[in-house]
Image: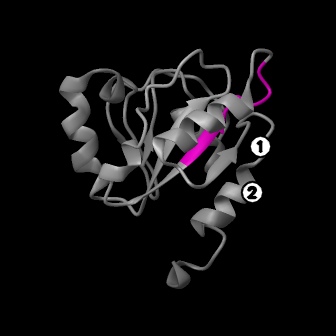
């Protein structure tokens, strides 16, 4: 499951991971696919929806905190992952943005508790292979 604010790149990275054409569209509802749950950014931006993220997290093996490299702030509080019952990884998106500060975004994710952080650009596919390997998507279904 991917979590992140609106515009962080959750849907875009989902499209890239599945090898689909990158087309921006605002996520209006929780999207389920074979391996990914992609909720709207409002679910993390508004505390009234936070309970839904907790419920969806019980359906997944790994939670991905998405943070764009050009973000001016982080929505993730320090030690946020301490309350998770699943592994939480950090994913820094938009690493090739003109305003990117990859290391600052990664530091914010580490402060939140992400021990593993990936750097990806969904358009150029930079970093996606490493993420796919970590998730085990390049293994046969029986090995997952």
In the depicted structure, whether residue 27 falls above or below residue 31: above
46 magenta-colored: no
| Quarter residue 48 falls in | top left
Q: Observer-nearest residue: 27 or 76?
A: 76
Which residue corresponds to the image point at 37% horizontal and 29% vertical from the top-left?
A: 40
Residue 14 in view here: no
Left or right: 116 as drawn, with respect to 113: right
Q: Which residue is mark 2?
A: 129
Label 2 SS: helix
Q: Observer-nearest residue: 21 or 74?
A: 74
Q: Position of residue 9 (x, y in %)?
A: 57, 30
Residue 125 image label: 1
Give the distance between the C-alpha atoms of the residues marked 1 and 2, in whole angstroms.
Answer: 8 Å
Q: Position of residue 24 (x, y in %)?
A: 58, 23
Residue 132 in view here: yes
In the depicted structure, whether residue 15 falls above or below residue 28: below
Which residue corresponds to the image point at 70% horizontal and 37% vertical from the top-left?
A: 122
Label 1 SS: loop
Q: Are marks 1 and 2 in contact (CB under 8 Å)?
A: yes
Q: Look at the image and give the residue range highlighted in magenta.
A: 90-97
Left or right: 33 as drawn, with respect to 95: left
Which residue corresponds to the image point at 60% horizontal and 80% vertical from the top-left?
A: 140
Which residue corresponds to the image point at 76% horizontal and 48% vertical from the top-left?
A: 127
Residue 22 image label: none
Mark 1 nearby-residue class (10 Å; few <14, some 14–19, many ≥20): few
Q: Observer-nearest residue: 89 or 21?
A: 89
Furthest residue toward bottom = 142
| Quarter residue 69 falls in | top right
């Amino acid at each position: 499951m991917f979590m992140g604010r609106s515009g962080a790149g959750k849907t875009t990275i989902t499209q890239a991971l599945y090898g689909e054409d990158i087309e921006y569209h605002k996520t209006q509802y929780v999207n389920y696919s074979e391996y990914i749950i992609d909720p709207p950014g409002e679910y993390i931006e508004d505390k009234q929806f936070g309970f839904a993220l907790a419920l969806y997290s019980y359906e997944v093996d790994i939670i991905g905190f998405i943070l764009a490299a050009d973000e001016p702030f982080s929505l993730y509080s320090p030690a946020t992952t301490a309350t998770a019952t699943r592994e939480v990884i950090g994913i820094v998106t938009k690493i090739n943005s003109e305003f990117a500060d990859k290391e600052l975004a990664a530091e914010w994710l580490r402060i939140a508790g992400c021990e593993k952080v990936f750097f990806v650009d969904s358009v150029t596919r930079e970093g996606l292979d490493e993420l796919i390997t970590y998730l085990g998507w390049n293994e046969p279904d029986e090995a997952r």
